[in-house]
Image (tube, rainbow, N blue to C red):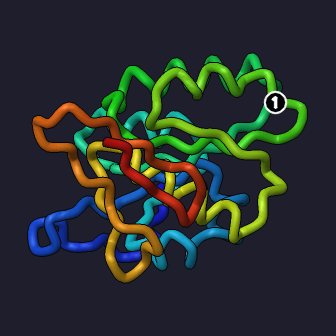
Amino acid sequence: MMKNDTHRMDDEAHGRPGNAAVLGIEYFFSRHRCMLGDLGYGSTGFERPQELAAALRHGSRFDLLMLTFDGDWRHVVGEMRALAAFFPRDVATLLVLHPHQISAAPSILMTGRSDFVMSSIGDVELTARLEILCRRSPRIAMAASGCRMPPVQKARNEPRQAAHDLGPMLSLEIR
């Protein structure tokens, strides 16, 4: 069953994405509903992977996926592969794993726009990890009201490298 929990930001007016798909109502909506709102995201919750896949298939656009699955690590990997067919590779994805699912972690780390955390993570650390993940994503510029860090600026056509995400509050540029 799909549940709209918070109102989506007006993307056109603000020029930034702001809708998160949250899979695993029992975990996320009890604990992190307000956190997503504070970061500038509206959120739509899904109880089952099939519901999220159907929404994606029918054109729903999400800029952040927060996913948790039941079952062992093989089940997690299988569900991730099934869902990957329906969402673009540039969508920031956070997989929340239970201790018995840790073997699934390498499958989510295939892109720089993906991360995983353990289900026991605290709110402060989770907020920092979400901010870092969203800064890495080309689709997301964090809402100014909810982000402690400025969005990553794209480098001009100069021979320099940016070293970002050295910590939740630290970003530096190397020339």
Quarter of the image holding residue 150? Answer: bottom left
Q: Amino acid at mark 1?
A: Gln
Q: Residue at x 89, y 31 (%)?
A: 100
Asked whether, in this view, residue 175 is left or right of residue 133, the answer is: left
Residue at the (35%, 28%) spot, across then down: 89
Provide the secondary structure element on which disc 1 rests: helix
Q: Position of residue 122 (x, y in %)?
A: 77, 65
Residue drawn 81% across and 30% down?
101
The residue beneath circle 1 is 101
Could you tell me which residue is drawn at 42 percent across and 34 percent down?
A: 53
Residue 55 visible, this orientation: no
Q: Nearer the viewer, residue 92 or 77?
A: 92
Q: Residue furthest front?
A: 175
Crowding around mark 1 (Cα neighbors within 10 Å: few <14, some 14 to 19, many 20+) is some
Image spot of residue 58 (x, y percent): 26, 38
Q: Position of residue 11 (x, y in %)?
A: 18, 66
Q: Is residue 82 above or below residue 95?
A: above
Q: Residue furthest right?
A: 100
Residue 38 image offset from top left, x and y in percent: 48, 78
Q: Quadrant of the C terminus?
A: top left
Residue projecting furthest to the bottom: 145
- Can residue 137 be seen at all in this image of the molecule? yes
Q: Is residue 5 left or right of residue 91?
A: right
